[in-house]
Structure formats: structure tokens, C-alpha cells
Amino acid sequence: MPETPLPPDPETSATVSPQSCGDLFRSFTVLALQGFGGVAAVAQRELVERKRWMTNTQFVEEWAVAQIMPGPNLVNLSLMLGARHFGVRGALSALAGMLSAPLLVLLSLAWLYTHYADQPAVAGALRGMGAVAAGLVIGTGLKLLVTLKNNPLHPAQRLLLGSACFVTIAWLRWPLLWVLLALGGVGWALAWSRLAQREEARTRPTGSTGTRQ
């Protein structure tokens, strides 16, 4: 008897693929030029909402991987996304888009900053941009909160891990590497345990209580 095909995942089926390596290059160039001090904010909007290359859940999962890898987060994400669709050519196209135009802008701004950094107007503008960047990052975090409904951890466990991360980074000033290894390891173990329990419950015969007779 033929198996009944599973219904498509509405979140995954809503995504589309980049058209070409040139599309990757242009898209990541535009994305990089918008990322002054708050790349995560524009990355979610461009890749998930405008391009639809990823779902919110995929973005959160792959952003987490990009954060624990060495190097800038968005560069890591662009490499992963480009390689997935076009292999090495896609990864290099996305990387070139991320670095080419921003490098020219950075060199120009560095030259301007060298000559005008002591001007009060410049110092005030930089402080203002820092506040805007912080607001963009907070806004993106709030938008991504909805993806937590698919997280296997209990809400209390997520809250405890998030609070512990904030305290160790913002208050105690612990090195990021040790916080990632410690809290990330605890989170991984808890998630693995919950997923194992779900799989056991799913495969358990109907009517079985799971207790030994």
C-alpha cells in the first residue's frame, strides 16, 4: 500500500531560492551596506521578510550557529547560505558581496574620521548612531521571540538560560567563549533530553503507560 505523502511544512514551503550567484552577490552587497552597527536587524528583514530565502526558525537556528563560529556573524551566515544553494561558487559570491562595497565605505569613513573626529558634531552623531543600533538589535530580538514556540525547552528553562547569559555577559563581564561553552552546553543537554523524551513518547505503542510491569 503506497504511503500517504506528508503535508508540506507551510513555513518551509513559503521560502524561495536565490536565482543565481549574481543574485547572491547583489543581495548581500545591499544587505551589508545597510548594516551600520546593527546587522542582525536588517539581516532578518532582508533574508526572511523580503527575499524569503529563509524562515524565521531557520534564521534563528543558523544565526545561532554563525554566532558561535569564529568571525563576523553575518559573514558566516552568508557563507552558509551561499554554499547551500550554489556550493563553493555561491559561498564566494555571497562573501564578495558582503565585503567589497563595505570595504570601500569603511576606508572612506576612516579617512573622514581621522580628519574630523575632534569636531563636536561628529562625536554627537556617533553617540546617536550607537543608540539607534542598540534599538535595532532590541527590535529584532523582540520580532524573533515568536520562534521560541518551537523550541523544545520549557519556558522556565529558556528564561533561566537567557537571564544567566545576560548576567554573565553584561554584569560579570565573563569571556564570551566560556559563557557559550558553559550555558550553550547546558542548553544543548536540556534540549537533547527533551527531544529524546518526545521521540520516546511518539514511538511508544498506544495504550502503553511507559512503566515496567
Image: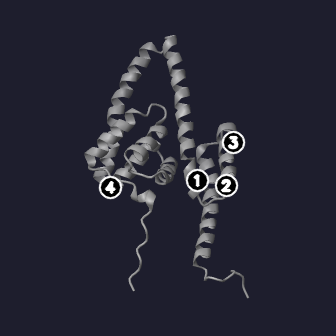
Sequence-wise first label, 4 or 1: 4
Sequence-wise first label, 3 or 2: 2
Which labelled disc corresponds to residue 155? Answer: 2
Toward the bottom, the furthest residue is 213
> Could you tell me how far apart the alpha carbons at marks 4 and 1 are, in whole angstroms?
27 Å
> Could you tell me how far apart the alpha carbons at marks 3 and 2 are, in whole angstroms?
18 Å
Which amino acid, by three-letter code, is at mark 3? Val
Name the foreground residue: 163 vs 169: 163
On screen, residue 209 versus residue 13, left or right, reads: right
Q: Are marks 4 and 1 in contact (CB under 8 Å)?
A: no
Task: Identify the residue under disc 1.
Answer: 148
> Could you tell me how far apart the alpha carbons at marks 1 and 2 are, in whole angstroms?
9 Å
Which amino acid, by three-letter code, is at mark 4? His
Q: Is residue 174 shown to the viewer in this render? A: yes
> Could you tell me how far apart the alpha carbons at marks 3 and 4 are, in whole angstroms?
39 Å
Sequence-wise first label, 3 or 4: 4
Q: Are marks 1 and 2 in contact (CB under 8 Å)?
A: yes
